[in-house]
Amino acid sequence: MREPKSVTEATAEYKVESDQIGQWIGERVELESEYVAKDGTSKPVYSANITALYRDFVAWLEENRSDRYAISQKSFAVMLGERPGITKTKATSGPDKGKMIYSGLLLRPLPPCVASQR
């Protein structure tokens, strides 16, 4: 037996509304397509460490969704790594050397009025 169209639509709407990470990405993250080099290889150019991403996610939740609780950083990292176009690797150089970074995304700059409150 097929479920009614209204149930299917309500379920789809609930999934979108309850996708905290998807909403955060939509508001706070710049996603990118992979850069294709002259030799035909491709790799993401944007990257950010998981600690910075998680801190921003929690702050975003507090600013916009006070009725929701933050998931753990571990759960956040797993769920973020499952998103299309986002890859998880350990940085081998630079300021994040040895830390987990996620490639394919970059935090958008905060507006000055919000940045001064953080």
Image (cartoon, rainbow, N blue to C red):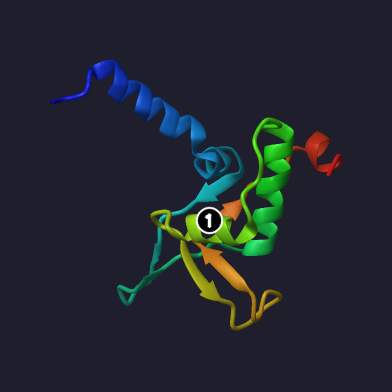
* 82 vs 110, nearest the viewer: 82
26 lies left or right of 5: right
Q: Position of residue 86 (x, y in %)?
A: 45, 59
Q: Residue at coordinates 51% horizontally, 74% vertically from top-left?
A: 89
Residue 27 seen in this snapshot: yes
Looking at the image, the residue that sits furthest to the right is 116
**Quarter of image, res 97:** bottom right
Q: Is residue 35 above or below residue 30?
A: below
Tell me where residue 95 sits by quadrant: bottom right
Q: What residue did someone put label 1 on?
A: 105
Residue in the picture at 57% in, 47% down: 29
The quadrant of the image that shows the C terminus is top right
- Position of residue 56 relative to residue 87, above or below, is above
Up the image or down, 24 lies above or below 54; here it is: above
- Asked if one can make out residue 109 in the rendered structure from this viewpoint, the answer is no
Residue located 67% across and 78% down the image? 94
Q: Quadrant of the N terminus?
A: top left
List x then y, in percent, for residue 49.
63, 65
Residue 84, position in %: x, y? 38, 54
Q: Residue at x 66, y 41 (%)?
A: 69
Front-most of 47 and 77? 77
Residue type at mark 1? Leu
Outermost residue to the front: 1
Dot 1: element: strand
Where is residue 48, by image quadrant? Answer: bottom right
